[in-house]
Amino acid sequence: MNSHDVALSTTPVSEREGLMRAPSVIFIVDDDADIRQALTGQLNSADYEAISFASPEDFLDAPIPDVPACVLVDVRMPGMSGFDLQAALAERGRVLPVIFMTGFGTIPMTVRAMKAGALEFLTKPIDEDELLSAIDAALARDAQQIQAGAASAEAKRRYETLTPREREAFALAIGGLMNKQMAVELGTSEVTAKVHKRQVMAKMGARSLPDLVLIADQLDIVAAKKR
């Protein structure tokens, strides 16, 4: 690869929208030093934080910050390819959006990348607007993943505070049972069943039954049905 393969303009950041960005990082993985330098400089000038690596192996050894991030990676490199890196990322709990770049793009290669979950497949010379648009989309996707992961972790933490009885009430409530039916299933009074349900709602931070159902989906909790 040659540095001239990366055709990016030098649009001043003051002329671009979104000057004030939330903390995020773009990882550049390419074996060509000129490519890495060109991309890093261009992205930094466009108000992105960019960190480059000479190989997929080096990148995989680096820590991933808990902020929205994405990987801009070349397809063909010595050792691990871009596809190998994508597969390695898929095995991690923290899966980052991947944007491929190549000077030798083919339709089968593009299809393979997209089926494996790549966000975008860019052919060199790379158009600046196309690249930055892909990066913004990737960072937005990762921000959603981080938010969903945090919500899931919080739901799990809250669920662990429930008593065994409240967990039973949780499963019955999301199954659509009324207080009287829940009382029968729990072997208690309707008043007590109502108290259990109210405690579940409060501890789980659910304002309504639909909220509780959504939380149950996050936790993969199966609704209990009337016997």
Image (cartoon, rainbow, N blue to C red):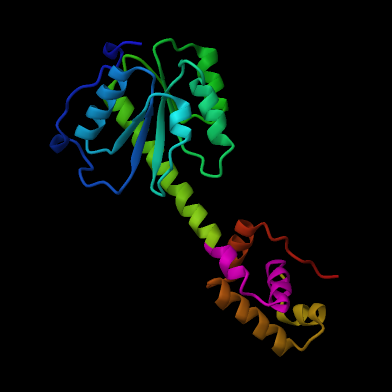
Please tell me whether residue 189 is drawn above or below residue 22 in the rendered image: below
Residue lying at 33% horizontally and 44% vertically, measured from the top left? 24
Determine which quarter of the picture holds residue 181.
bottom right
Number of callouts in the render?
0
At a point 77% along the width and 82% down the height, the residue shown is: 183
In the displayed structure image, the side of residue 77 where residue 158 appears, left or right:
right
Please identify the quarter of the rendering in which residue 64 is found. Answer: top left
Q: Above or below — where is 117 with respect to 76?
A: below
Q: Is 172 one of the magenta-colored residues?
A: yes
- List x then y, in percent, for residue 34: 28, 17
Q: Nearer the viewer, residue 156 or 200?
A: 156
Q: Residue at x 63, y 57 (%)?
A: 217
Q: Chief secondary structure of the magenta span?
A: helix
The answer to whether residue 177 is seen in the rendering is: no
- Taking the image as shown, residue 54 lies to the left or right of residue 216, namely left
Quarter of the image with the C terminus is bottom right
Q: Where is residue 197 drawn, in percent x and y?
A: 65, 79
Q: Look at the image and tell me whether residue 6 can be seen.
A: yes
Q: Which residues are magenta?
A: 154-175
**Residue 1 at x, y percent in the picture:** 36, 11
- Measured from the top left, where is residue 182 in percent x and y? 75, 78
* Drawn side of residue 47 relative to residue 71, left or right: left
Q: Which residue is most to the right? A: 227
The vertical placement of 71 against 197, above or below, is: above
